[in-house]
Image: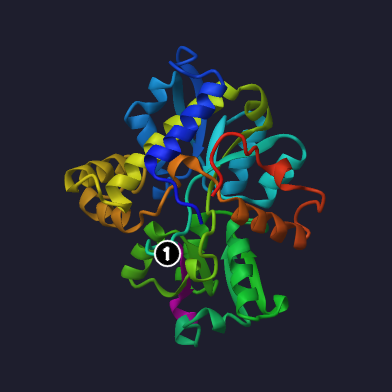
């Protein structure tokens, strides 16, 4: 996979912005709503907001927080949110097919050497023999909804382990909190989730780790940046400005907590910034450990892994969760960011 450094990625975005007519801010405090989850993986947006990168781009950002990916996609299509970062879902693909949404960039990605999403088992299932993914036969797997990223990950693991479709039950529980509760109480057997949630659950003794998603999907484009099809097509200057500010936030995050090239003081400042949005109800001393342990790579320059997106699209079509006629170009506007 081609790797982009910060300079290359931001240079590419600067070129895209210039083509879209962005040099100095093109607007005066243009108000936009940005959809997000209270996850460390959404830190690029939080950093861009807190450090004034959105403001410098002429964007007056207000966050809208969600508890799952599907409602966020609906909010983009309805205009209740202008830009958002989350996983590719069946709902998002269907909205793209209807001409209502477009993926415009990449965000979180699995990377070897960086702790990523973890495969978890309930304590009860673990004690009954679910100690590796190979033992998922006859078990249940938690997801928010059918066609969610959890559904995709679980089914790809099932297939890789040679388990028949009928031998893994997917249970839709709508919200992350409900899945956590069900896993801890043994109502479901397994789940996969980002490390800032997985690691505290493991450390607290509530669940067991039985695998890593990167072992099955080594360059999985976990989350993408997306917007309405109208914004992508008709608001190019604003969209390029958003992506450039977002990429600057990602670069700061990666330097502080992934590559650790910015120094310990910068890492501490970054954790404090993220804590305003993630685990804000917990004391800093406790939350900081989870935030640091849960940091994953956010793609430089919001570059997008086309192969991973295509694989996800192919899976959704194979499962008949979206129309077979949906193509990559229907889902993605590839004109804004670099290809990985």
Position of residue 143 measured from the top left corner of the image (x, y, whole percent): 59, 61
Position of residue 222 measured from the top left corner of the image (x, y, whole percent): 53, 54
Residue 63 position (above or below residue 134): above
Residue 44 position (above or below residue 295): above
Residue 89 position (above or below residue 276): below
Front residue of this view, candidates 72 and 179:
72
Q: Is residue 282 visible?
A: yes
Position of residue 108 measured from the top left corner of the image (x, y, whole percent): 47, 50
Query: Would residue 77 appear left or right of 153 to someone viewing this image?
Result: right
Front residue of this view, candidates 201 and 59:
59
- Would you name the residue on which mark 1 appears? 112
Q: Residue at x 45, y 62 (%)?
A: 117
Residue 132 position (above or below residue 183): below
Front residue of this view, candidates 220 and 276:
220
**Residue 118, magenta (yes or no):** yes
Secondary structure found at label 1: loop
Q: Residue at x 49, y 52 (%)?
A: 2
**What is the span of residues highlighted in magenta in the rendered image?**
117-125
Query: Would residue 113 appear left or right of 241 to someone viewing this image?
Result: left
């Amino acid at each position: 996979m081609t790797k982009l450094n910060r300079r290359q990625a931001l240079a590419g975005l600067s070129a895209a912005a210039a083509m879209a007519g962005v040099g100095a801010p093109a607007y005066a405090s243009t108000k936009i709503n940005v959809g997000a989850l209270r996850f460390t993986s959404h830190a690029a947006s939080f950093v861009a907001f807190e450090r004034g990168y959105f403001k410098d781009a002429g964007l007056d950002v207000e966050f809208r927080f969600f508890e799952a990916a599907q409602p966020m996609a609906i909010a983009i299509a309805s205009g209740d949110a202008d830009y958002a970062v989350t996983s590719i879902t069946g709902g998002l693909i269907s909205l793209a097919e209807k001409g209502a949404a477009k993926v415009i960039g990449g965000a979180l990605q699995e990377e070897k050497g960086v702790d990523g999403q973890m495969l978890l088992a309930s304590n009860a299932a673990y004690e009954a023999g679910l100690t590796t993914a190979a033992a998922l036969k006859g078990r249940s797997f938690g997801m928010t909804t059918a066609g969610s990223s959890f559904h995709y990950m679980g089914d790809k693991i099932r297939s890789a382990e040679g388990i028949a479709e009928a031998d893994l039950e997917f249970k839709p529980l709508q919200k992350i909190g409900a899945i956590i509760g069900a896993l801890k109480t043994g109502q479901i057997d397994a789940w996969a989730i980002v490390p800032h949630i997985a690691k505290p659950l493991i450390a607290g003794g509530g669940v067991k780790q039985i695998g890593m998603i990167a072992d099955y999907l080594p360059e999985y484009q976990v989350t993408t940046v997306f917007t309405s099809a109208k914004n992508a097509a008709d608001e190019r200057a604003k969209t390029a400005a958003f992506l450039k500010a977002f990429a600057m936030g990602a670069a700061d995050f990666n330097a502080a907590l992934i590559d650790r090239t910015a120094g310990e003081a910068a890492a501490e400042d970054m954790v404090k910034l993220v804590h305003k949005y993630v685990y804000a109800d917990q004391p800093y001393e406790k939350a900081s450990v989870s935030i640091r342990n849960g940091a994953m790579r956010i793609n430089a320059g919001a570059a997008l892994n086309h192969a991973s997106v295509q694989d996800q699209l192919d899976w959704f079509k194979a499962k008949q969760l979206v129309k077979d006629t949906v193509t990559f170009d229907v889902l993605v506007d590839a004109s804004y960011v670099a290809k990985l």
